[in-house]
Amino acid sequence: MIELRHVGFSWPGEAPLLKNISFSIAPGEKLILLGANGSGKSTLLKLLNGLIEPDCGDYLWRGEPLTRARLRAPGHAREFRRACALLFQHPEAMLFNPTVREEIAYGPRQLGLADIDARVGHWAQQLALESLLDKAPFLLSGGQKQKLALACLLALDPEVLLLDEPSASLDPATVGYLIDLLLHAGKTLIVATHNLSLAAELGERCIVLGRDGGVLFDGPIGAALADMPLLEKAGLAHRHAHRHAHQHSAVEHAHVHVHDWQ
Ligand SMILES: Nc1ncnc2c1ncn2[C@@H]1O[C@H](COP(=O)(O)OP(=O)(O)OP(=O)(O)O)[C@@H](O)[C@H]1O
């Protein structure tokens, strides 16, 4: 469904960020993207969403190169936008309609989809937004905005969901609900996150971006999370002196340490 072949990318005037990235993603795969701050996870998701183009290499969508010309062709653009949806790291960027109801309806209406009221009702109910339907999106809490942005994407019924830090503002109960929802949604998932427990529960496969712009690891998520040297090399684990909660003495010691993962 998605294939990157030797893709490279630099933001204008910046040093190369993504270098020689190659991988394929089959329909229904659940892939977690890990990497240190600034390693290029959000950039890679934008590239997969066709918002930016590789400087070199190829992006194949359903076996055909996803070129700017193909994305500008009205029929194809509509089909791609419906099939491949991106949740931005900062969901405020996606919200501009006067009410939550209109926000969820906007995408399906733009794409000429049927049953708009039913889509709005269903996803508002699924994401516990029903009581907020007439409220202005900018008045919502951070977590409510994140859920609204997700409802907007799910209302399109995309085949591929690209999620950039989807759990960032959510409370633990909502993260649990989100994991269940996504696991049973039957979608291809590509999720960039620093939340390693979310990664472990949601993902099957994991790609770790290295600090040099390349793919450091591509394989089962369990193997990545158990590989301390890999996590340390990727900047996802660190060494520091600390005191464990069960220790009553004042002894501190240093070892490789991963936050948010046991
Ligand atoms: N629009 C842009 N123009 C110029 N540079 C950018 C732009 N967007 C991102 N960058 C740069 O690209 C690099 C990678 O950013 P990106 O947001 O992809 O990283 P990330 O892995 O998602 O990081 P984080 O874990 O902090 O969210 C950073 O150095 C950032 O400053």
Image (cartoon, rainbow, N blue to C red):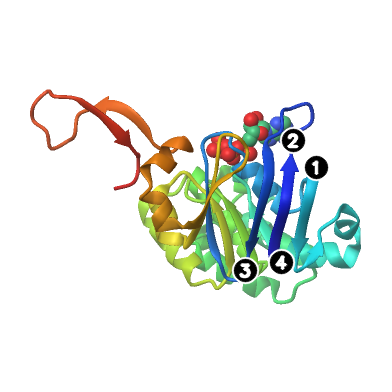
Mark 3 or mark 2, which is nearer the start of the sequence? 2
Task: State how far apart marks 2 and 4 are (Cα).
Answer: 26 Å
Q: Which residue is mark 3?
A: 26
Q: Position of residue 192 (x, y in %)?
A: 54, 49
Image quarter for ligand 1: top right
Name the residue: 75% across, 68% down.
Answer: 62
x and y, in percent, of residue 14 in the image: 74, 27
Report which residue position mark 1 lands on: 55
Residue located 46% across and 43% down the image: 194
| Label 1 vs 2, first from the N-terminus | 2
- In contact (CB < 8 Å): disc 1 and disc 2: yes
Residue type for callout 3: Ala
Q: Using the image, tell me which numbered label, if any, was put on residue 89.
A: none
Is disc 4's CB within 8 Å of ligand 1? no
User: How many numbered circles are shown?
Assistant: 4
Disc ID at residue 83: 4
Whole-percent x and y of residue 65? Answer: 82, 60
Q: Residues within 10 Å of mark 4 (few under 14, many from 20)?
A: some
